Image (cartoon, rainbow, N blue to C red):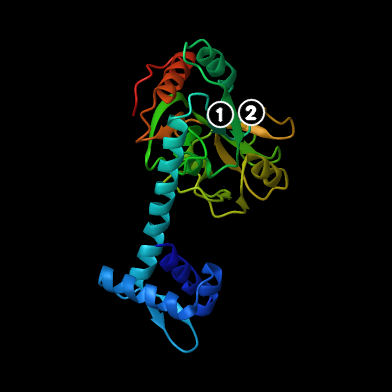
Amino acid sequence: MEVGQAQLQDGAGNGYRGVVAAARLAIAQPALSKAVRRLESRIGVKLLERSSRSVRLTPAGEALLHHGRHALNAVGAAAEKARRAGDQQAHLRLVIKPGGDANLLSGILAAYAGQPDARQVDILFDGATDRADYVRDGRADLALLYVPFDDLTGLDHETLRVEGRVAILPPDHRLASRSELTLADLVQETLPRWKGVRWTGAPEAGQGPEVTDAAEALQMIRLGRTIAILPRSLAQPMHPDLVYRPVTDAPHSELVLAWAQDDCRRLVASFVAAAAEAAGTTGGRR
């Protein structure tokens, strides 16, 4: 699979010849070509369109590349989880976005520390969009995520907080004098494009400047380039040079604790139960 994936990657979109993929794998090009033909024969479809000038993927090749990457990541994650399951001293790893804990983290850690089987918890900080991938590929055991912003495919989760959303505006904005807003008030406004976020009909799916996180969005708001609609906890602390107004009919967001669906380890369940207790929820899986 590694041989085929290297050939597929180098044939995807940049016109590299097979010799490039062969060099990456430290094998001769004829051997690589033979391996790819053998893979095509085994699957029963053509994966590459070859010419004297380029190599490019067929639709079947694109599908194999996409799903093959996920399969290889899953194998790697399974091996890492198996290794950690056998390590009685392994730390628990929680990935969060800076400021993305709704002020719950200290209470969660205190509640978990009281568990008889508590482990040391390593806090990993990452950006706005790929914390779920940390859990899926085994780099972290759990993640604090926001729904509907984060993709929960392949994950179970416990909802820790449900909250409303606020619009953040520059002080000279036409709506800044209102005490509260509706989505209809904002329909003509420029909203940011959140890098890497998959939207499903959410009101924040904008066409404005691309931003990676709330800090970048706030800077663009100060410049008058956009406004933003954020979960209330992500709008904290409030900046004195901006205006914050509740959006009364915006769908609520959820702060969730997420873990891999196939992760049945006791230490993970113990942390989830402690987090639910600290947040005042039931502790049931979803």
Residue at screen point 43% across, 77% down: 31
Q: CA distance from mark 2 to mark 1?
A: 7 Å
Q: Above or below — where is 55 with respect to 265?
A: below
Tell me the kind of residue under disc 1: Arg
Q: Nearer the viewer, residue 118 or 228?
A: 118
| Residue 216, position as x, y percentages in the image | 67, 45
Query: Which residue corresponds to mark 1?
Result: 232
Using the rendered image of the protein, determine whether residue 179 is visible from the camera's viewpoint: no
For the residues labelled 2 and 1, say whether their Cβ atoms are less than 8 Å apart. Answer: yes
Question: How busy is the neighbourhood of tag 1: few (under 14 within 10 Å), some, or many (20 plus)?
Answer: many
Q: Nearer the viewer, residue 144 or 209?
A: 144
The local secondary structure at tag 1 comes to: helix
Q: Nearer the viewer, residue 94 or 181?
A: 94
Using the rendered image of the protein, determine whether residue 68 is visible from the camera's viewpoint: yes
Query: Which residue corresponds to mark 2?
Result: 236
Picture quarter with the N terminus = bottom left
The local secondary structure at tag 2 comes to: loop
Q: Above or below — where is 39 with respect to 75?
A: below
Question: Mark number for residue 271?
Answer: none
Residue at screen point 25% across, 72% down: 44
| Residue 284, position as x, y percentages in the image | 34, 21
Question: How busy is the neighbourhood of tag 2: few (under 14 within 10 Å), some, or many (20 plus)?
Answer: few
Residue at screen point 48% across, 24% down: 88
| Residue 202, position as x, y percentages in the image | 44, 44
Residue at screen point 44% across, 81% down: 30
Tell me the kind of residue under disc 2: Gln
Q: Nearer the viewer, residue 195 or 92?
A: 92
